[in-house]
Each structure stands twice: as structure tokens, then as C-alpha cells.
Amino acid sequence: MSSLELRNPHSVLAALKTRPQDVLEIQINLSSASPAWKEVADAAASQGVTVRQPRPQANKPRKGGPRDGRTSLNTATIRPRDGEELKNVLRSEAPRGLWLALDCIQDPHNVGAIFRSAAFFGVQGIVLTEDRSAPLSAVTYDVSAGGVEAVPFSLQTNLTRALSVAKEAGMWVLGSSEHAEMDVAEVDRDRRWLLVIGNEEKGMRRLTTENCDMLCTIPCQGAVTSLNASVAAAVLMSHLVRP
């Protein structure tokens, strides 16, 4: 993937702050731009990135994006971030902390929302599977609202091996499952946890489950018995990062 077209000003602003050299083009109609896009224009000027008037074809909304069905003249083209080495993402001297592993999450909106929540809750890194998973597309970047820029991540072909590397680094692997018996509120937070979020429909794969040290669940309190994967991930993160 050589470049991504972003339409969320917050994702563009995050890229300008962290790696302006990878922002290839910005188009903003300054006469009608929102305050957020005007902030993008100011940040671009401070970084020496040129802002141009939108081309006419920029009127066409991107299918599947967070603004699908709405016209947006303002866009930015950026290079995608490169993933990091797994050991670098998992490295930490702290006695406690939280990392995530996404086991075949296939909806780019879910991946983006998880990155956004991870950035909010101070998650230290995310491990993603390359196969049977949503790519880090423009939709993911936009939904994350800057989260993809803020949280280190590593793409892995073998999640089972990645879990072993995490354990060798002193982490405990915590699987999330609606069938688990332990309430997430009972999890000992004074550890370094790698929390695994399973696929939207099937949950964690069998080998992934077998390589978890513990399994936890979010107790259901109402009539609806399941949560969207990204919502569940945010609830779990909220519990696990508490002091």
C-alpha cells in the first residue's frame, strides 16, 4: 500500500505531528473548512507542508469510510506507518502495563476504534495478525482519529509464536471470551498483560485460546448478551488500566 487518502482532520493532524515527512498532499477548502481542518492547515504551515485547493474529483465520498454518504472536499494523502519489530513493541521495564493482540479482527472500523481506545487508555502496543484480518486502511486510520499514529504496533503471521515471545518477555496472556468464567474485574492488574481480542464472529482461535494464561469475560447485565468487538475491547481496557 503506497499511500492512503484520509478525510478525518484528527487523523491528519496526528500524522503531521508525528511524521510530517510522510504527509504527501493536503487539500483544504479554507473558505468553508471546519475549525479542525483549519488547525490542520496551521500545523501543515508550521511543518512546511503545502496546502492546496481541492480538486473537483475530491467531491466523491469514499465508500465504507466514516463519512460515507457525505461530501468532503478536504483530504490528505499520507504514507502508511510501518509496523515495528515484535520485541520492540513488547519491550518495557515497567512491572505492569497493558498490550493488545488482535486475533483476526476483520472489520476495519473495529480495528480503528480499538486503536483509538488503546491510545486513550495508554495501551503500550498492539500485535495484529496479517492473515484473515482487516488491513490498516484509510478507513482504519480515520476511525482511529490519530490512534494509529500514537500506539506502536507489529504485524505477525503467527500469533501463537507472538504470544510465546510475549511470555518470554515476562508478560501474562489474557484471553477475552464470552464463555470464560472469570470476571475481568477479578483480574490482577499488577502484572504486564497482553490482552487478546478475538474475531467478531468466532472469537479467539483454538490455538490462541490454548496459549492464554487466563481467560476473562465481561458479565452481561441486560437483555443483549454480546458486545461489538471494539466496544468489548474498550470495556476490558478500562478495567485493566485502573491503578
Image (cartoon, rainbow, N blue to C red):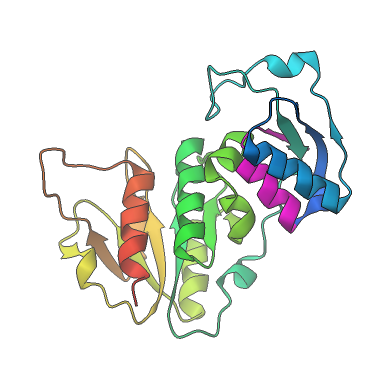
- Is residue 112 placed above or below 86 in the rendered structure? above
Q: Is residue 136 visible?
A: no
**Quarter location, residue 201:** top left
- Is residue 46 placed above or below 194 in the rendered structure? above
* Position of residue 211 measured from the top left corner of the image (x, y, whole percent): 37, 65
Depth check: give the residue in front, 44 or 183. Answer: 44
At horizontal 49% and vertical 66% (from top left) the residue drawn is: 122
Specify whether 240 is left or right of 153: left
**Quarter location, residue 52:** top right
* Position of residue 222 measured from the top left corner of the image (x, y, whole percent): 11, 43
Q: Quadrant of the C terminus?
A: bottom left
Specify whether 216 is left or right of 93: left
At horizontal 32% and vertical 59% (from top left) the residue drawn is: 236
Magenta run includes residue 41: no
Q: Is residue 196 visible?
A: yes
At horizontal 52% and vertical 64% (from top left) the residue drawn is: 162
Count of numbered badges drawn on the protein: 0
- Is residue 28 placed above or below 131 in the rendered structure? above
Depth check: give the residue in front, 67 or 223. Answer: 67
* Position of residue 92 measured from the top left corner of the image (x, y, whole percent): 56, 80
Q: Quadrant of the N terminus?
A: top right
At horizontal 49% and vertical 72% (from top left) the residue drawn is: 166
Magenta residues, as a range?
A: 1-18
- Is residue 54 placed above or below 150 in the rendered structure? above
Magenta run includes residue 7: yes
